[in-house]
Image (spheres, helix red, strand yellow):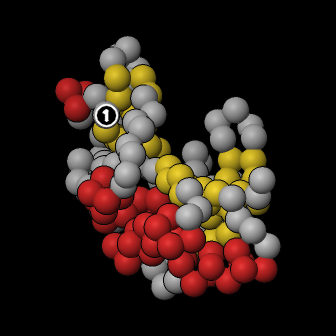
């Protein structure tokens, strides 16, 4: 079975075109950006060699049109699509990709994470270099550990 993996071009924390898990597993990935036509790309590749599954990491960065195109991959090409990403940003606002995935997905499975307080984490918290919550700035800023901001999961009570 052949799975095609995609990740957002904006996310290069583990190297461009690479998806990595917290336990150290990794896979090469095709990159998408705001201008990518995912349906056309997947269909063309599927015609050359059968695709059995599409996995999209960092799906919060998908556009409304790209989420629609992925639904067409499922409906027209009969290829399952699995999407992984954040629901909301550090301000608690839905990402566009997440908004339409929540609205149009056939099935939603929440992967639970635990907050440092021991409760289910439901938010992403942006911290400054001193470890203080920082709720301003560009929502698209992705960061590595040695940069300006660090992101942590937490409960809404801990914001």
Q: Quadrant of residue 54?
A: bottom right
Residue in front for this viewpoint, 57 or 76: 76
Does any portion of residue 11 appear in the rendered image?
no
Q: Is residue 49 or residue 122 the one in the foreground?
A: 49
Q: x, y (%) of residue 61? A: 43, 65
**Residue shown at 39%/46% (left/top)?**
107
Tell me how many marks there are.
1
The residue tagged 1 is 122
At a point 56% along the width and 56% down the height, the residue shown is 80
- The residue at 46%/44% (across/down) is 150
Judge the density around disc 1: few (<14), some (14-19), many (≥20) Cα neighbours within 10 Å.
some
Residue 38 percent across, percent down from the top left: 54, 77
Whether 12 is drawn above or below 24: the answer is below
Left or right side of 138 for 93:
left
Q: Position of residue 12 (x, y in %)?
A: 63, 62
Q: Is residue 152 above or below residue 9?
A: above
* Left or right of residue 120, residue 31 in this image: right
The one nearer the camera, 137 or 74, is 74
Residues 78 and 142: in front is 78
In the picture, the quarter occupied by the C terminus is top left
The answer to whether residue 31 of the structure is visible from this angle is yes
Tell me if residue 99 comes above or below residue 116 in the rendering: below
The residue tagged with tag 1: helix, strand or loop?
loop
Farthest-out residue, left: 157
Q: Which residue is painted at 50% across and 64% down in the image?
A: 74
- Quadrant hosting residue 64: bottom left
Q: Position of residue 6 (x, y in %)?
A: 62, 64
* Residue at the top extreme of this rendering: 118
């Amino acid at each position: 079975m052949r799975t095609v993996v995609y990740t957002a071009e904006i996310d290069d924390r583990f190297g461009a075109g690479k998806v990595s898990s917290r336990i150290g597993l990794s896979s090469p990935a095709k990159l998408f950006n705001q201008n990518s036509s995912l349906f056309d790309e997947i269909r063309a590749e599927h015609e050359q060699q059968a695709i059995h599954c599409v996995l999209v990491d960092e799906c919060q960065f998908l556009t409304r049109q790209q989420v629609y195109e992925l639904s067409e991959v499922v409906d027209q090409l009969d290829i399952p699509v699995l999407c992984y990403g954040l629901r909301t940003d550090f301000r608690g606002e839905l990402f566009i990709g997440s908004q339409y995935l929540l609205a149009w997905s056939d099935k939603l499975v929440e992967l639970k994470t635990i907050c440092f307080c021991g409760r289910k984490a439901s938010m992403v918290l942006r911290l400054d270099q001193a470890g203080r919550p920082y709720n301003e700035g560009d929502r698209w800023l992705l960061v590595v550990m040695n940069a300006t901001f660090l992101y942590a999961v937490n409960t809404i009570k801990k914001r």
